[in-house]
Image (spheres, grey):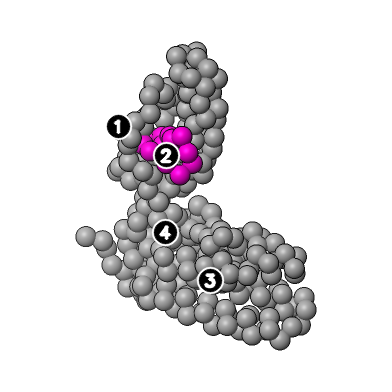
Amino acid sequence: MALLTDGNPNTTESLRVYETEILSLANIEMIDLDAKLGLALDEVSYAVLDTLMDHARTTDPQALVRRLTGVSDVVVTPQLRRWHALHTLETVYRDAFNNQLNDRYQMKWDEYRELSGDARDQTVRYGIGLASTPIPRAGLPLLSSVAGVNPATVYYARVSWVAANGQEGSPSLVTAYETSDGSLLVAQAPAAPVVATGWNLYLGLADSSVTLQNPSPMALGQAFTLGALVAGAAPRDGQTGDIWIIGGRSLRRG
């Protein structure tokens, strides 16, 4: 699972699962869906932080510094992702109604406001997951090439950070790089966060089929030069919760 601070849990395409005409509506009413996704993320994050501070003062392991850590250790569960999507749609139809004062938009606004509230309750009942060693999503890898023997190729790459305890953060977004004929791809990780002790590289010939290329995490600052692609593991979606805050109670995994 990604961390809540890694970026929007949903995309504009994700919203179409709930509302098939949402792209058309946004176009007609000139509503910026990406901006609404970001606004909804902020509002959901504030609500999650409020829940942690209000209901888990004695059980949250970060209770004394929660105001400083915010939601940086909160993982995105399926329940929280659904809440974010429904709250985004609530804000979209709120804007659409305020633009047009259209009764149909009012009904949609009310519908998604109720669904969003239910999703928030379900998220809290299921539990807010906390990662004991939160690892942020990596930035884009730095790609270049050196003289070699491989043909010209377009490679797709992602990187992720690994902590000392072996946990891996969410992989970066995909970036592409085209090498010239008679060269070798070279990959380096971007600037590392304090928690990282190593990094993983995922490569492929399509953005949807990148796989792990290094058998063990590489050291920070170490460059990777590709000889031939290997069919390693597919990238994971980040960390899972180690501790779950449920209505003022915490449950430790395992």
Residue 152 seen in render: yes
Please state which of the two labelled residues, at mark 2 or mark 4, is closer to the viewer: 2
Nearer to us: label 3 or label 4: 3
Q: Residue at x 27, y 63 (%)?
A: 252
Mark toward the viewer: 4 or 1: 1
The structure residue drawn at horizontal position 33% and vertical position 46%, both measured from the top left corner, is: 167
Q: Which residue is mark 4?
A: 75
Q: Residue at x 47, y 65 (%)?
A: 81
> What whole-number distance in Å separates the C-alpha atoms at marks 3 and 1?
40 Å
Of discs 3 and 1, which sits in the foreground? Answer: 3
Residue at which label 3 appears: 18
Residue that carries the numbered disc 2 in the rendered image: 210
Type of the residue with mark 4: Val
Asked which secondary structure carries label 2, the reply is loop
Q: Which residues are magenta?
A: 200-212
Q: Is residue 223 above or below residue 176?
A: above
Does the magenta run of residues contain 208?
A: yes
Residue 19, compared with residue 108, is above or below; it is above
Of the image marks 4 and 1, the number of the one nearer the N terminus: 4
Q: CA distance from mark 3 to mark 2?
A: 29 Å
Cα distance between the residues tagged 3 and 4: 22 Å
Give the amino acid type for the residue marked by disc 1 in the picture. Answer: Pro
Residue type at mark 2 is: Val
Amino acid on which the number 3 mark rests in the picture: Tyr
Q: Quadrant of the C terminus?
A: bottom left
* Residue 92: image tag: none
Find residue 230 and report its horizontal and vertical position in percent: 34, 31
